[in-house]
Amino acid sequence: MKKVFIDGYNVINSWAELKELDLGSARDKLIEYMISYASFYDAEVTVVFDAHRVSGNSQHIEKRFSVEIVYTKDKETADDYIERSVDQVGRKVEVLVVTSDNLEQQIIFGRGAQRMSSLEFRQSFKEAEKSITEKTRKLSDTQSLKLYDHMDEESKEKLEKLRRNG
């Protein structure tokens, strides 16, 4: 299973559809997207929002379905948290870090993790979203919920006669 770390505010500021929302709504929408992403790719996703400018803030971690959401403590950046987490995971599992911060990408790569920019990740997410939509459409086409589609031919003929003759 792949472990994915997302620099939350970096992604929000890179994706136009998130950037136009208020911050709380953008965080919620990103988390909603990541729940779908984690499910589609069978990945463990951690979205990190830094609170290094929020005086007195202590670290807060919550879980929504398969996604872990981390709000870092005072004076800790998302980059700091992600670097420490990548070090803890080590090279035991495949790790992907999503950030557009070039320095952070170099540091993460040096520690054995894969890296992807926020815009590249958006493309990957959009491809997953398209596949999910297509699979859902195919399932709904093949697994119709209409009673008529599950009737035998004789019953369909009787029903048609009733419809025509009243």
Image (cartoon, helix red, strand yellow):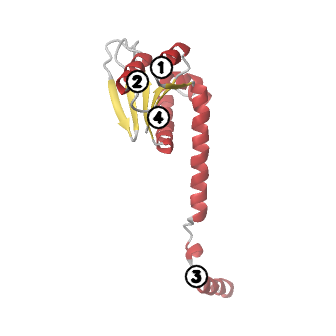
- What amino acid type is highlighted by mark number 2? Val
- What amino acid type is highlighted by mark number 1? Ile
Question: In 3D space, how far apart are the residues under numbered discs 3 and 1 (Cα atoms)?
Answer: 60 Å
Q: Which residue is mark 1?
A: 108
Q: Which residue is mark 2?
A: 86
Question: Toward the viewer: 133 or 115?
Answer: 115
| Above or below, 164 relative to 120 | below
Disc 3, SS: loop
Q: Which residue is mark 3?
A: 152
Q: Earlier in the sequence, mark 3 or mark 1?
A: 1
Q: Earlier in the sequence, mark 4 or mark 1?
A: 4
- Residue 93 seen by the camera: yes
| Above or below, 72 relative to 123 | above
> Which of the labelled discs sits on residue 31, or is there none?
4
| Above or below, 40 relative to 92 | below
Q: Is residue 136 left or right of residue 160?
A: left
Disc 4, SS: helix
Question: Toward the viewer: 138 or 160?
Answer: 138
- What amino acid type is highlighted by mark number 3? Asp
Q: Residue, x 55% and y 15% (percent of image)?
A: 102
Q: Residue, x 35% and y 24% (percent of image)?
A: 88
Hey, which quadrant is residue 164 in on the image? bottom right
Which mark is in front, 2 or 4?
2
Mark 2 surroundings within 10 Å by alpha-carbon count, few (fewer than 14), some (14 through 19), many (20 or more): many
